[in-house]
Image (cartoon, rainbow, N blue to C red):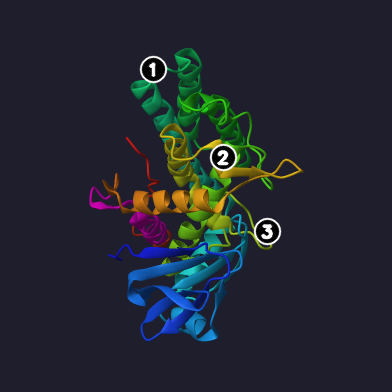
């Protein structure tokens, strides 16, 4: 089993990363502020004006440590990785299955089933813990609707019907999302999903967290030997990581829960955000570091994998799911089991 390693997030503008022996050295104003052994890392994510030496890029590629470059506000720019790993036969099987509409619908149902079940779990958890502070009628109504959609996903559905069900589930879930915000509602509220740019504080948090999850899911698929660009629910489009988008569906509620924790615990406040003249919202440096730290800590939490019934860090779930998908494509499993929290 793969070990859960850390991801180095570099947010300090003007920082420069270099190779020093077997370590990654982070320099700021020509002074080394941090050194990390490369064998403890599975990825480096650079935000904004962060440079890397060509020797470090080559060293990390050789050691299978992916370096990603994002804008200061979390928009993906580029990544540097080593040679594609994995078995070419696995990729060929993935491509053949992706061309099969029936199989694609089967996979899409699995991914969306995981997403909807985890959204319902998040709503039910809030109902259980904060019934005295929320509109329980609205929440119960949303839970019942999601339960009905889960039942429909248990039947054979063509791909367009699965997409329609996913759209209905997203509408129901996000219509209840504002009720999950228990505190600081004068600043943090949710009306509808907005992105590029996010138009309120909550959407700003969600978009940034989804970018982090996307990075981890894509890295896990690549490490397993699958092609993150060829999906089943998300069809081929130049520049789109279809399979990574497919698999991250079941992990989106996990990101939602982190955003809600940051809000409800008061770890982030309105003063931690900046609103541009166009209405776009972005986080200040301190808020971004708080979010990244929380995300990393959350990935260290040890939980029992619901299918394997083994305890492992949450950060390893991405890789485990990619392995399970590969085993299903090879015919070693009867189906793909999405992560569903209970």
253 or 17: nearer the viewer = 17
* Image coords of residue 41 (percent x, y): 37, 69
Residue 313 falls within the magenta-colored stretch: yes
Q: Badge 3, how many Cα within 10 Å: few under 14, some, many 20+?
A: few
Q: Are marks 2 and 1 in contact (CB under 8 Å)?
A: no
Q: Which residue is mark 3?
A: 237
> Is residue 129 located in the magenta-colored stretch of the structure?
no
Q: Which percent across, then down, holds residue 261?
A: 42, 37
The residue tagged 1 is 131
Give the quadrant of residue 271: top right
The answer to whether residue 175 is above or below residue 196 is above
Q: Nearer the viewer, residue 187 or 122?
A: 187
**What main secondary structure does the magenta stretch of the protein show?**
helix
Closer to the chain start, of discs 2 and 1, is 1
- Front: mark 3 or 2: 2
* Mark identifier at residue 243: none
Q: Point out the image quarter for the C terminus.
A: top left
- Label 1 and label 3: CA atoms lie apart by 43 Å
Which residue in the structure is indicated by mark 2?
271
Residues at marks 2 and 1, CA–CA distance in whole angstroms: 29 Å
Residues in magenta, as a range: 308-328
Q: How far apart are labels 3 and 2 at the CA level?
A: 38 Å
For the residue pair 5 and 286, the one nearer the viewer reads as 286
Spot occupied by residue 74 in the image (x, y as percentages of width and height): 59, 56
């Amino acid at each position: 089993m793969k070990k859960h390693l850390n991801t180095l997030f570099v947010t300090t503008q003007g920082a420069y990363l270099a190779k020093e022996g077997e370590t990654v050295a982070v320099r700021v104003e020509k002074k080394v502020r941090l050194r990390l052994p490369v064998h403890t890392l599975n990825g480096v994510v650079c935000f904004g004006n962060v440079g890397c030496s060509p020797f470090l890029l080559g060293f990390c590629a050789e050691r299978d440590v992916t370096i990603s470059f994002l804008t200061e506000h979390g928009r993906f720019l580029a990544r540097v990785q080593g040679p594609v790993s994995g078995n070419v036969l696995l990729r060929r099987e993935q491509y053949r299955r992706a061309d099969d509409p029936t199989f694609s619908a089967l996979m899409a149902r699995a991914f969306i089933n995981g997403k909807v079940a985890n959204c319902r779990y998040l709503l039910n958890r809030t109902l259980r813990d904060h019934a005295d502070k929320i509109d329980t009628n609205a929440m119960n109504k949303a839970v019942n609707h999601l339960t009905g959609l889960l039942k429909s996903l248990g039947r054979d559905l063509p791909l367009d019907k699965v997409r329609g069900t996913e759209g209905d589930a997203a509408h129901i879930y996000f219509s209840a999302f504002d009720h999950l915000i228990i505190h600081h509602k004068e600043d943090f509220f949710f009306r509808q999903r907005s992105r590029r740019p996010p138009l309120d504080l909550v959407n700003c948090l969600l978009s940034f967290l989804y970018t982090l999850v996307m990075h981890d899911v894509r890295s896990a698929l690549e490490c397993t030997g699958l092609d993150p660009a060829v999906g089943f629910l998300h069809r081929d489009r130049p520049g789109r990581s279809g399979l990574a988008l497919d698999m991250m569906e079941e992990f989106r509620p996990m990101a939602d829960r982190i955003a809600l924790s940051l809000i409800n615990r008061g770890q982030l406040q309105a003063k931690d955000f900046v609103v541009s003249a166009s209405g776009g919202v972005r986080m200040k440096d301190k808020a971004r570091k708080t979010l990244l730290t929380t995300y990393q800590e959350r990935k260290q939490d040890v939980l029992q994998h619901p299918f394997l019934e083994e305890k492992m860090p949450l950060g390893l779930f991405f890789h485990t799911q990619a392995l399970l998908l590969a085993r299903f494509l090879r015919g070693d499993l009867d189906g793909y089991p999405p992560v569903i929290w209970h």
